[in-house]
Structures are given as structure tokens and as C-alpha cells.
Amino acid sequence: MSNLGEQPPKNGGRVTLKLAALEDQRVRYLFTLLTSSTQHDGALSIDVEGGQVQIEEGEPDVRDEWMMELVHSLVRGAWRNREQYGWPRRITRWRPTPRQRGE
């Protein structure tokens, strides 16, 4: 089995979310933000009723703000689709940096 997903990306950034706890009112995910030069780990929770996302551990550096926007987008998508598909155990996505996208 390949360990490619564990290696830092050569460019851009990779977000990985792992389901940590599934409770009646809250869902908890552990997250990793990974670039070629940094790794940031943390935890977040999602309110099942309203979909609000709260960072519980590991508030990222401002340089990783674009990756946190992706994290919020991914967990909000999981929240919207939870009744049809359930809560995903793992979500992994790669995106180019804002500079690579020309922003």
C-alpha cells in the first residue's frame, strides 16, 4: 500500500479530516493541514442541529487561512449531506495555494 497520502505535497496544500466522535448534538473531526513546509493539526466540532463549526484545538497560523476556508467548506458540505450519506469517516482534499491560483 502506498504512503503517498502521508507525504507532504510538493506544492499547494492538503487537508485531511478524520471523524473522531459522533454524538447526538455534536460531531468531532481531527484535522491536518499539510504543505511542503508546514503541518498543522487540530480538532473541530460541528453542531448537528445548526451546522456551526467551532475550532476546538489548534487554531492555525494566519498563513493557513486559505486552508481553513477549505476545512469549513468540507465540513459544511458533510453537514448538508449527512442525512443522505451519513458522516464521512475521512475527507482528504488537495488545493493549490491562492498564489498558484492567481489570487
Image (tube, rainbow, N blue to C red):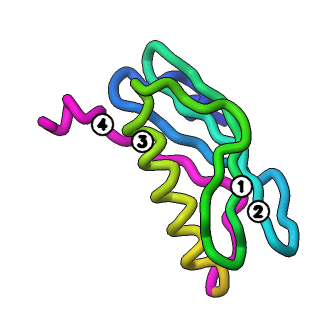
Q: Dot 4: within a 10 Å radius of its alpha carbon, few (fewer than 14), some, or many (20 or more) residues?
A: some
Residue 27 tag number: 2
Label 3 and label 2: CA atoms lie apart by: 23 Å
Sequence order check: which comes first, mark 1 or mark 4?
A: 1
Tell me the residue that label 4 is attached to.
Answer: 96
Tell me the residue that label 1 is attached to.
Answer: 45
Sequence order check: which comes first, mark 3 or mark 2?
A: 2
Q: Position of residue 88 (x, y in %)?
A: 67, 64
Sequence order check: which comes first, mark 2 or mark 4?
A: 2
Say what amino acid the circle numbered 3 marks: Trp
Q: Position of residue 20 (x, y in %)?
A: 81, 51
Is residue 30 positioned above or below 34 on the image? Answer: below
Residue 94 tag number: 3
Q: Dividing the picture into quarters, in which one does residue 23 lie?
A: bottom right
Say what amino acid the circle numbered 2 marks: Val
Lateral position of residue 16 relative to residue 13, left or right: right
Asked if the residues shown at circle 1 and circle 2 are in contact, with their CB atoms under 8 angstroms apart, the answer is yes
In the image, 22 versus 84, the foreground residue is 22
